[in-house]
Amino acid sequence: MSPAAEASLATVTLRARDARRVQAGHPWVFDSAVESESPSIADGSIVRVEDATHRLLGVGPYNSKSRIRVRLLAREPVAIDTAYFERRIRAALSVRERFMPTATSYRVVNSESDLVSGLIVDRYEDVLVLQIASLGLDQRKSAIVAALEKVFSPRAILERSDGPSRRFEGLEVANGLLAGTLGEKAGRVEVRLNGLRFEVDLEGGHKTGLYLDQQTNYEAVSRFAKNARVLDCFSFLGGFGLHAARAGARHVQMLDQSEDAVAASLRNARANDLAARCEAQVANVFDWLKAKSRKDPHAKASETGAYDLIVLDPPSFTRSRSSVPDALRGYKEIHLRALRLLAPGGVLATFCCSHHVDSKAFQEVIQAAAFDARVLLRRVASYSQSPDHPVIPAIPETEYLKGFAFERVDESR
């Protein structure tokens, strides 16, 4: 950015007590943190953010309609153009190539984790899917698309900007093809995760099509599956279940409340020659577990549990701090029921993607469920999100997925 361009930027000055968090690396400037600002700032324009001593903290797009008044995109004055996005995308790609060198489908850009607040880009083989959650980036969509085409030369770029955060930025839902062609199968593509084939609906599927944040965990959990009877709850497209079947599970039962997801998981099982050991059922997991587990709340867990490996990977139970108590009750209930179906020596692999429920609270609720189920658990593994969803400790919101594997101790030995 030229000196003249920098001098022309409007300025947002922060209160002294709020500047430290931004200076430490967090890119969000909340409206409550603003001490003063230049008059008549156009929404979406790039502004200069300063502390109370007029020290530069960074630059980013402004939005008067959002509680996040400014999203910092750079610590120094730079033009937010195609060249900027290309640099950021290449830097993010280098992280994936370093930590997931064999992956062909993964998250390319993970918003704040990759220093581009408001932008998500997922790669599904030769197709890219982007989500934009901020006004400033929405106004620069053409520059983002141009940068993605330059870096990847993809067959197609699809937009799935339909997240709830857009309405807080004053934006409408935006879905559609931005570049290239999807071919005869429209938004259905075949992707590979850890060598397994999955059919993904990029246009109509959940989120951008697949839960890429579990990619490394699918394989990690499967090491407990050899010769096991496996129950995969909230199975979606069969990520955990199919990896378990490939690892040598005797039988895999997958459960999901979506008919489309169950049908897709069965197609994926057939595509990987795993159908003989897999079945899938449309079911409300809470109701299914309740019906299958023992009804006497004071009874000791069955000495011959039905499953040797149970996977719990539910959707988020809460999106706000105010509903955390209800979420914890839900987590306890589902773990209590699952533990009553777990065989002695079996493993429960369980995950929580609720940002507002931290690891300590999650483990405490599992332990409470174990106490009520009258079983003793041994923690044998801990999990986090895949490396294509990096965690920056200075930005707590970048860490949301936590998981553990617990062995039910066989106390008869």
Image (cartoon, rainbow, N blue to C red):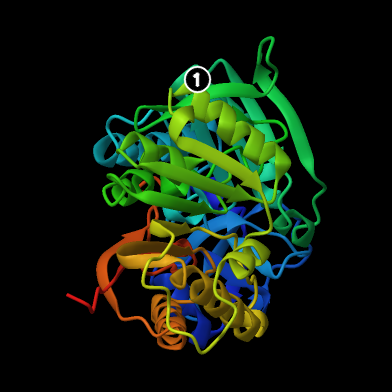
Q: Residue at x 66, y 43 (%)?
A: 206
Q: Residue at x 48, y 85 (%)?
A: 299
Quarter of the image holding residue 194?
top left
How far across and how far down the image is residue 228, in percent?
A: 33, 49
Residue beneath disc 1: 126
Q: Secondary structure at mark 1?
A: loop
The amino acid type of the residue labelled 1 equals Asp
Q: Quadrant of the C terminus?
A: bottom left
How far across and how far down the image is residue 393, in percent?
A: 36, 68
Q: Residue at x 40, y 75 (%)?
A: 359
| 96 relative position to 337: left or right | left
Between 305 and 338, the residue placed more toward the observer is: 305
How far across and how far down the image is residue 333, in percent?
A: 57, 77
| 265 relative position to 96: left or right | right
How far across and how far down the image is residue 324, in percent?
A: 60, 81
Q: Residue at x 61, y 39 (%)?
A: 208
Query: Crowdedness of circle 1 by 10 Å Cα count: few (<14), some, many (20+)?
Result: some
Q: Is residue 11 visible?
A: no
Between 188 and 254, the residue placed more toward the observer is: 254
